[in-house]
């Protein structure tokens, strides 16, 4: 749209940019060169060389660097904020000339899957209410998951909710310690799990977790030089969230909805087993096992698991898109911040961008679902023991890692594409392509790689997920339910307990990373705004990571 569309459609090589914008861009950067020169000649920055002057613009009006021709930063809206304009709002700042419902088919498919989930849940919950589900922790129901399992999931939900809030509070209060605590907790948990499995003589699982723990320790060691820059970005994101918009309200509402959905999912899953698990003790089954079947149970569990991944991923990305709108308004309009930023951003995410968010969430949900299947298969192979079990664990572990890499790549693109969608309302594929081109052309990938907040939050969500899985495992050992005498349900219960904790923690911590990602992307769209309107942040970023000037300043 406007200058942004011209940039993404090849504006750097297809003719000169508007003359008034080009002049403003050069003027801002020449003035900043003098300011930075003074700063680098004083105090603790004296040893740092001044940033090189920008090269003279070529004949076509772009900026030639390293053999590439970059156009000037794209305008971010048709209607920039005006000083002292009290009626100025988010929809005016990031105006969509002809708004429309993008990727409508994905939104409709999402609603159909949700409707199917509701239908399965209603039938399953009715079966739970009229079946032999037991009446507490200790009951005589032997054929399937029962009230014992429901109480287990309730404990996992409560633990995930409390741990996520505590984790968010730690990040809000102690940004730098937050990074260290996350790394140390994951190391303790990884090595502790490996030692426990080896102590119990689950050799295959113990060796795999030990390798994972060593890899985690090495990764954390390589993080240490990047912690100061990451702490700065985390502190900036949190400071903004305290003063602008309703970031923590959105986070709490999202976390509450995720917890409520987790409870709904847990009850539905137990209800499926109670209603359709074949057994002579199941009152829903006919004399010959009619109306029940393992195939039905497996099929429905597969469906609700996939649906839950898609629904929770959509919820997380919707929160992310809303928060991106708030931080985008702060970056571009900090001196006249739209008062309706949160409300208008939410309206756009839930209407015109609903289908685009559903489409990106679908891709991630499919990958996550496949990883979940690998996790269950890996745990079942670990229980078998022996050479065959070890080979199975190793195979599914490698497959899970490969899927994890693919998931990371897709989520990386998604996170920054949703920032584009939040402000410009584009279709998913167009936003993903345009944002990826901008990230590579502007060098924003260097900032992304230097910042650890994404991996730290992922490790935090993993910690909450593993804590819930461990709680489930200990619960099964202590209560010894009749249906799990042979341990056949242990991998399933642990996997779903992990899923509950991981997704809830992910949703709670989404706003923290959303702010940092929006700042990076916005700096790529218009770096002059960073220098002009946020000089203190820019100076601190240069002090901790001098290469920032090559990304934000030189280009």
Image (cartoon, rainbow, N blue to C red):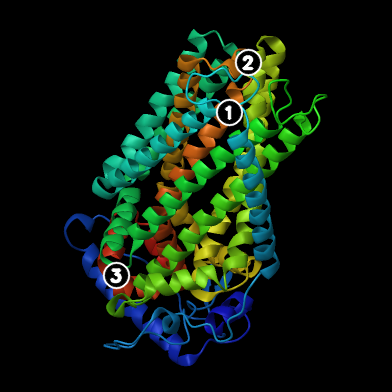
Residue 367 in sight from this viewpoint: no
- Asked if labels 1 and 3 touch by Cβ distance under 8 angstroms, the answer is no
> 267 or 243: which is nearer to us?
267
Q: CA distance from mark 3 to mark 1?
A: 60 Å
Residue lying at 54% horizontally and 50% vertically, measured from the top left: 312
Horizontal side, residue 185 vs residue 387: left or right? left
Task: Report x, y in % for residue 463.
Answer: 43, 34
Task: Report x, y in % for residue 235.
Answer: 28, 54
Which mark is first along the chain, 2 or 1?
1
Q: Which residue is mark 1?
A: 133
- Of circles 3 and 2, which is in front? 2
Q: CA distance from mark 3 to mark 2?
A: 56 Å
Which mark is first along the chain, 1 or 3?
1
Q: Which residue is mark 2?
A: 383
> 86 or 41: which is nearer to us?
86
Determine the image quadrant of residue 441: bottom right
Q: Which residue is mark 3?
A: 534
Task: Report x, y in % for residue 345.
Answer: 45, 71
């Amino acid at each position: 749209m406007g200058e942004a569309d011209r940039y993404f459609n090849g504006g750097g090589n297809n003719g000169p940019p508007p003359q008034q914008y080009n002049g403003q861009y050069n003027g801002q950067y020449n003035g900043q060169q003098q300011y930075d020169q003074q700063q680098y000649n004083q105090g603790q920055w004296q040893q740092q060389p001044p940033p090189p002057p920008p090269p003279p613009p070529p004949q076509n009006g772009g900026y030639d660097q390293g053999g590439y021709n970059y156009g000037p930063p794209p305008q971010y809206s048709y209607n920039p904020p005006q000083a002292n304009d009290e009626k100025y709002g988010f929809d005016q700042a990031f105006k969509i000339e002809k708004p429309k419902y993008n990727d409508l088919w994905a939104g409709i498919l999402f609603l159909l899957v949700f409707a199917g989930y509701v239908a399965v849940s209603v039938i399953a919950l009715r079966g739970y209410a009229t079946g032999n589900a037991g009446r507490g922790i200790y009951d005589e129901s032997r054929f399937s998951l029962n009230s014992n399992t429901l109480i287990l999931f309730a404990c996992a939900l409560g633990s995930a909710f409390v741990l996520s809030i505590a984790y968010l509070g730690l990040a809000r209060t102690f940004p730098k310690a937050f990074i260290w605590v996350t790394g140390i907790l994951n190391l303790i948990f990884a090595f502790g799990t490996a030692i426990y499995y080896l102590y119990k003589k689950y050799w295959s699982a113990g060796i795999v977790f030990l390798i994972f723990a060593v890899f985690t320790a090495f990764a954390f060691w390589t993080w240490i030089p990047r912690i100061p820059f990451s702490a700065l970005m985390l502190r900036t994101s949190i400071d903004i969230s305290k003063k602008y918009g309703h970031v923590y309200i959105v986070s709490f509402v999202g976390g509450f909805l995720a917890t409520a959905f987790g409870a709904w999912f847990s009850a539905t899953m137990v209800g499926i087993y109670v209603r359709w698990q074949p057994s002579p003790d199941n009152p829903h089954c006919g004399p010959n096992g009619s109306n029940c079947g393992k195939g039905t149970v497996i099929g429905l569990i597969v469906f609700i698991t996939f649906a839950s991944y898609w629904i929770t991923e959509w919820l997380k990305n919707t929160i992310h898109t809303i928060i991106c709108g708030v931080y985008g308004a702060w970056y571009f309009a900090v001196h006249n911040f739209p008062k309706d930023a949160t409300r208008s951003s939410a309206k756009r995410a839930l209407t015109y961008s609903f289908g685009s968010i559903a489409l990106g969430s679908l891709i991630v949900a499919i990958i996550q679902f496949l990883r979940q299947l690998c996790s269950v298969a890996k745990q079942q192979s670990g229980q078998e023991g022996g050479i065959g079990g070890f080979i199975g664990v190793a195979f599914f572990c490698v497959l899970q890692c490969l899927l994890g890499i693919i998931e990371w790549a897709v989520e990386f693109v998604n996170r920054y594409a949703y920032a584009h969608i939040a402000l410009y309302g584009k279709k998913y594929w167009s936003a993903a392509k345009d944002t990826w081109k901008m990230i590579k052309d502007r060098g924003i990938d260097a900032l992304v790689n230097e910042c650890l907040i994404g991996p730290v939050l992922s490790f935090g969500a993993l910690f909450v997920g593993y804590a819930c899985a461990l709680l489930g495992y200990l619960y099964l050992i202590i209560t010894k339910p009749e249906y799990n005498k042979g341990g056949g349900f242990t991998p399933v219960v642990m996997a779903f307990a992990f899923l509950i904790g991981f997704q809830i923690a992910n949703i709670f911590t989404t706003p923290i990373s959303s702010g940092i990602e929006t700042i990076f992307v916005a700096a790529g769209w218009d770096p002059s705004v960073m220098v002009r309107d946020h000089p203190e942040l820019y100076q601190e970023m240069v002090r901790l990571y001098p290469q920032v000037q090559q990304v934000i300043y030189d280009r």
